[in-house]
Amino acid sequence: MSGYPPYGNQGGGYPPQYGGGNSGYPNYPQDNSFQQQPPMPGYNDNQSCASFYGTGAPPSNNMNYPPAPYDSYGGNPMSNPSYGMGGGNNYPPPPGGQPPPPMYGQPPQQFGGYGNSQYQPPYPQQPPPLQQFGGYGNAPPQPAYPQQPGPPPPGGMYPNIPGPSGFGVRDSLSLNFFKIIVLTFQQGGMPPFSNQPPGPPPQEQQSVLLASLENYQGTVFPFPTFNAEADCQGLRHAMQGAGTNERALIDIVANRSNFQRQHIKLTYKTMFGIDLVKQIGGELSGEFKEIISALFDAPATYEAWSLHKAMSSGKEGTLREILLTRTNAEIRAIVDTFKRTYNKDLEHEISHRVRGTDFKHMLISAVQANREELSPQQIQQARQMGIESVIDRNRARQDAEDLYKAGAGKFGTDEKTFNAIFARRSYYQLRATFEEYQRKHGKDIAQVIRSEFSGDAQDAYLVLISCIRDRPTFFAERIHKAVSGLGTRDSTLIRVIVTRSEIDLAQIKQRYQQLYNRSLAQDVGGDTSGDYKRILLSIVK
């Protein structure tokens, strides 16, 4: 916040890293063929699947509209739209007598990757299962950490990582190893209320793995009896006549997943020949209009718009919040959407618009989406044998020593060494590095950063450290800053609430209560008013 936060070696809540280039999942050939196969035994055709934001589910076939088209992503057969929708994937038998890749159901989950792109990320051929989504991110979830970092726990164990039997019902829908992010669609074009022509209709995309050992949950889920046509009629009725029935609007929009909202937009234009978002935008104003816009945007589109706006207005905090907390898959989707929407390269824009060499280098490293992440096999191994089984302690000790020599152990600071380690290592591996640093040199890594860096670079490293240790805590603190003091930072509040609503907002609420002895709903409600307040509280719940 992803996820906006935990991490599997997705790095601080990041998706697993696979092979190189377009290698895909080891030993499974790529194939773009698509054939309908009978569903797996026990598969529930009406079960929801995770959308980019986390738990958006495509409506079942009785929703009175045709299934969304699909595109292939990076030549991967997982772009098969039947995945997670009751259909089957037809994968060729793997060579060497290996067992065929398993089929998975679609539990509502966090995180995700997205978007149509010519870039071909090395995603595995068969999506492993599991929950949370993230799309927005779901940068991988990260275990909780003490408010004052103390000495590392004995044996290198991490807090709040459930054991093999700690999964809930949702996790048991598939293998109990890792979370699956189902990339459901990518909406092109500008964010709502812009003057740009609308982009192509939402299209279902391939599933993307998210390696994380923590379990997270949003507060917004797919509406169980979703009917796009009925919702369109309700929205049209709410905007007819004098004024707008904002409460009816909130009741529909706040209780649908992002995936379902995309279907509502498409169905509305099909039924009435009117762009729903533009029509709503003409009826509303202020922060209420902004949050409705954000909710109707596809995740990568909204985040690309947020980055574009932040670079135009010098909002470095937004750049840190998005680029340093998202999964590899999410970042790839954002980069692709930014290019398609603004006809500009995100890395180029960062190079020419962001000030501060060290901070700029960190952001450029982040948009490469190349952080090490846990593989499905490592997730399974960690579940069965503990986190230490997938951590390289020797590397952690060496990295800790390299950080010491690049900072406290020399005159000046070797910024390149810090960036190389922080940008490349997985979140779990970095936690081990932080432990080794404190064990050897008696200093918490956050203290080291405050001693060696300043300005935007220092803030960026502290954001990373916070997410590496516990992503929900980072976003709880972010919300608290937005509602504290004089005035409300409404754009920050809207962005965090919307983008984490289907990923880990439930855990963010818990951390907020623990940190400030007040509920998130109390503080959000006390700092906002009117329909804007009502829709925020409908999401926070």
Image: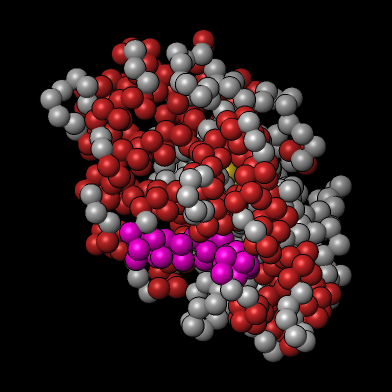
Please name the colour scheme applied to the rendered image: secondary structure
Determine whether 206 is above or below 445 in the image. below
Q: From this viewpoint, which residue is outermost toward the left?
A: 411
436 or 477, nearer to the observer: 477
Left or right: where does residue 278 sit relative to residue 460? Answer: right
The image quadrant that residue 282 belongs to is bottom right
Question: Which residue is at the front of the view, 277 or 387?
Answer: 277
Left/right of residue 374 with respect to residue 83 in the rendered view? left
Question: Magenta segment, which residues?
Answer: 286-314
Q: Is residue 8 left or right of residue 343?
A: right
> At 23% across and 49% down in the image, what residue appears?
356
Residue at 62% across, 44% down = 523
Q: Is residue 288 magenta?
A: yes
> Could you tell me residue 58's position as x and y percent?
74, 63
- Is residue 534 visible in the rendered image? The answer is yes
Magenta stretch prevailing secondary structure: helix
The verdict on residue 39 being magenta is no
Residue 79 percent across, percent down from the top left: 61, 62
Q: Nearer the viewer, residue 345 or 244?
A: 244
**Spot occupied by residue 182 in the image (x, y as percentages of width and height):** 64, 54
Q: Is residue 181 visible?
A: no
90 vs 431, nearest the viewer: 431
Locate residue 502 relative to residue 186 in the image: left or right: right
* Residue 260: quarter of image: bottom right
Looking at the picture, how far across and down is residue 206, in whole percent?
Answer: 61, 59
Residue at figure coordinates x 70%, y 53% from the top left = 537
Residue in view at x 67 percent, y 69 percent: 262
Q: Is residue 145 above or below residue 113?
A: above
